[in-house]
Image (cartoon, grey):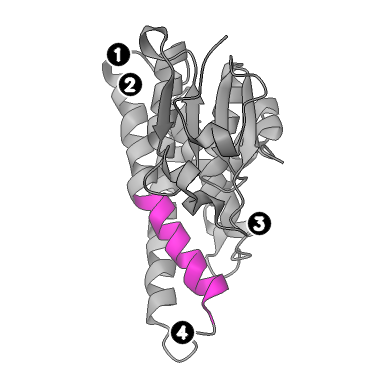
Amino acid sequence: MSDLSAFPITSKWPAQNPEIIQVYSLPTPNGVKVTIALEELGLPYEAHMVSFGTNEQKSPEFVSLNPNGRIPAIIDPNGPDGQPIGIFESGAVLVYLAEKTGKLMAREGAARYATLQWLMFQMGGVGPMFGQFGHFYKFAADKVANNSYPTDRYRDETKRLLGVLEGQLSKHQWLAGNDYSIADIATFPWVRGLSIFYKADEVLELKNYPAVMAWLERALARPAVQKGWPAPA
C-alpha cells in the first residue's frame, strides 16, 4: 500500500485509492488537460475538485504541492524509482505522463521536439493571451468601458495566435504533424473556451479559422476527451 502521508494535500483531499494517480483540478482549460491525457493513456486516477469559489487553490494544503497556487497538480504514487512524486504546472504534468507511458509524444528525434515546441507555444502564448482576452472581454468589461485598449490588445493577439494555429493545421491533421499529442491536448481546450466560455465567436471571427475549427471538432470527438473533460465533476 502506497503511503502518501508525506504530501500534506492528502489531509484535505484524502486518497480513496492511494495506489493510483491523484489529480487536484477543476474543469477549466488548464485543468482538463491532465484528465484528458490520463483517459487517453488509460491510466487510472482519482480526481479531487479544487474549488475556486472558496479559494481552495490558495489553501496551505494545496500550496504544499504547488507553491504557485494554481491547478492542476498531481501525485503519482508510482513515480521514478518507484517512489511517489508530486508535479505541478500542466505542461510539466503532460510531459511527465507522456514520458511515463511512451505515448502522446515521441521518445526521441525531430517528432519529440515538434511536440515540445507546440506545447511551449500553448504554455507561453495561447494560454496567457487567450486568458487575458477573456478576462477583459467577459469579466472586466465594465472596468474598461471607457478604455478599449486592453480588450483590443488581447483580442488582436488572440487572433494572431489563431492565425498561427490555422497555418499549421491547414497543413497537418494535428499540431505536431500526423499524430495526436500532448500539444493538442494542451491547446484545444483553450480554443473551445473562446466560444463556449467567453462567447467570443463573432468578435474573434472564429469562422475565419476553418482548419482550427475542424481540428477542434476532431479532438472533441475523441472518446477519451469526452470522458476526461468533466473530471473532477
Residue type indicated by callout 3: Ile
The residues bearing labels 3 and 4 have C-alpha atoms spaced at a distance of: 23 Å
**From this viewpoint, is residue 170 visible?**
no
- Residue at x 48%, y 73% (from the top left corner): 136
- Report the residue marked by disc 3: 196
Label ID, residue 40: none
Which element carries disc 1, helix, strand or loop? loop
**From this viewpoint, is residue 25 visible?**
yes
Instruction: Estimate the x, y position of residue 208 in percent, counting from the top left.
Output: 53, 58
Q: On screen, 128 above or below 91?
A: below
Which image quarter is the N terminus in? top right
Residue type indicated by callout 4: Val
- Residue at x 67%, y 37% (from the top left corner): 231
- Residue at x 47%, y 53% (from the top left corner): 58
Image depth: mark 1 or mark 4 in front: 4
Magenta segment range?
125-141
Q: Residue 117: which quarter of the image?
A: top left
Q: Is residue 54 magenta?
A: no
Instruction: Estimate the x, y position of residue 23 in percent, counting from the top left.
Output: 56, 32
Q: Which badge, 1 or 3, comes first in the chain's sequence?
A: 1
The residues bearing labels 4 and 2 have C-alpha atoms spaced at a distance of: 42 Å
Image depth: mark 3 or mark 4 in front: 4
Which element carries disc 3, helix, strand or loop? helix
Q: In the rendered view, does 156 fall on the left or right side of 44?
A: left
Instruction: Estimate the x, y position of residue 38 in percent, counting from the top left.
Output: 57, 24
Q: On screen, 163 above or below 78?
A: below
Front one among 87 and 228: 87
Q: Residues within 10 Å of mark 2 (few under 14, many from 20)?
A: some
Label ID, residue 144: 4
- Residue at x 44%, y 29% (from the top left corner): 94
CB atoms of marks 1 and 2 within 8 Å: yes
